[in-house]
Image: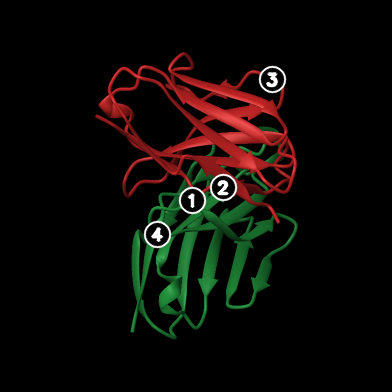
């Protein structure tokens, strides 16, 4: 089955700096890669996703890049703000798994003033 | 759009009793719903996948007689933890998808914190 690895497990940046979180996946059939933000005591919130037919996608301060050959994808947050502090999860799935997501282990992002 | 609710948000029950958690998609029809369990500072662990009108598909190691899942309509799925024990205490999260393939996004509910005393 699919295996998703995520690094780093914790990340501390100063407000205004950029943050990058990286994930690798094992199943070359995976073609959908969402990123979720989870605040303490809440459910994950979909913040951006990318499909295997594109290499990069942006939404304001958030961007995701995908390298299918290397089987890795990354989340980039620019101009970080204190409200970006949360746990971020990457995930992967493909059409053959009925939308089942395989999650990474999560990255705790702390944005300091 | 794509709002998923859960009820209750937290529940405390005594060992041996059963607890039902509801998951609703408020503004879309959810062909597929998923139930996850999350322990503190850990990732989400998929427990089961349910399609409307069909029996749920459980992940390996998840007891289907203990965690009863019903997906009676396109907007409602329920998880019943039967004969709960302290080790069942956890954060239970549902998610909903419009489709049955990986082409569809998955939207999560706010979670239910279960404490079994």
Q: Which residue was labeled with disc 2?
A: B108
Q: Chain of mark 1?
A: A
Label 4 crowd (10 A; few <14 / some 14-19 / many >=20)? many
Give the letter of the chain under mark 3.
B
Q: Are marks 1 and 3 in contact (CB under 8 Å)?
A: no
Residue A10 image-quadrant placement: bottom left
Q: CA distance from mark 2 to mark 4?
A: 18 Å
Residue occupying image coordinates x 53% and y 66%: A75
Q: Is residue A4 left or right of residue B13?
A: right
The foreground one among A110 and B111 is B111
Q: Estimate the spatial distance between the alpha carbons at disc 1 and disc 3, rounded to whole Å.
A: 25 Å
Q: How is the image coloured?
A: by chain
Q: Residue at x 32, y 33 (%)?
A: B89
Q: How far across and down, in percent of the image, does residue A48 sit?
A: 62, 62
What residue is pinned by disc 1? A43
Contact (CB < 8 A) between labels 1 and 2? yes
Is residue B109 visible in the rendered image? The answer is yes
> Element under label 3?
loop
User: Residue beneath label 4, please?
Assistant: A107
A106 over B69 or under it: above or below? below
- A105 and B15: which one is in front? B15
Point out residue A37 in the picture as x, y percentages from the top left corner: 49, 60
> Can the viewer see residue A29?
no
Chain A appears in which tint?
A: green
Q: CA distance from mark 1 to mark 2?
A: 6 Å
Same chain shared by disc 1 and disc 2: no
Which circle's residue, 1 or 4, is located before the other in the chain? 1
Disc 4 sits on a residue from what chain? Answer: A
Mark 3 lies on residue: B54
Q: Is residue A100 above or below residue B58?
A: below
């Amino acid at each position: 089955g699919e295996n998703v690895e995520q690094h780093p497990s914790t990340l501390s940046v100063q407000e205004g700096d950029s943050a990058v979180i990286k994930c690798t996946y094992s199943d070359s059939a995976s073609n959908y890669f969402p990123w979720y933000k989870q605040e303490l005591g809440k459910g994950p919130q979909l913040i951006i996703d990318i499909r295997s037919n594109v290499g990069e996608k942006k939404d304001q301060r958030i961007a995701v890049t995908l390298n299918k050959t290397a089987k890795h994808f990354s989340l980039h947050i620019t101009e970080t703000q204190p409200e970006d502090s949360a746990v971020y999860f990457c995930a992967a799935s493909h059409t053959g798994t009925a939308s089942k997501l395989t999650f990474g282990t999560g990255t705790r992002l702390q944005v300091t003033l | 759009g794509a709002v998923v609710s859960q009820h209750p948000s937290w529940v405390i029950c005594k060992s041996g009793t059963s607890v039902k958690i509801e998951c609703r998609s408020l503004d879309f029809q959810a062909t597929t719903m998923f139930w996850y369990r999350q322990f503190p500072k850990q990732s989400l662990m998929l427990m089961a996948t349910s399609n409307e009108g069909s029996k749920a598909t459980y992940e390996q190691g998840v007891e289907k007689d203990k965690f009863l899942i019903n997906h009676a309509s396109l907007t409602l799925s329920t998880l019943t933890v039967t004969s709960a024990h302290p080790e069942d205490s956890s954060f239970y999260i549902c998610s909903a998808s419009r489709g049955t393939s990986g082409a569809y996004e998955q939207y999560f509910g706010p979670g239910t914190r279960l404490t079994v005393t």
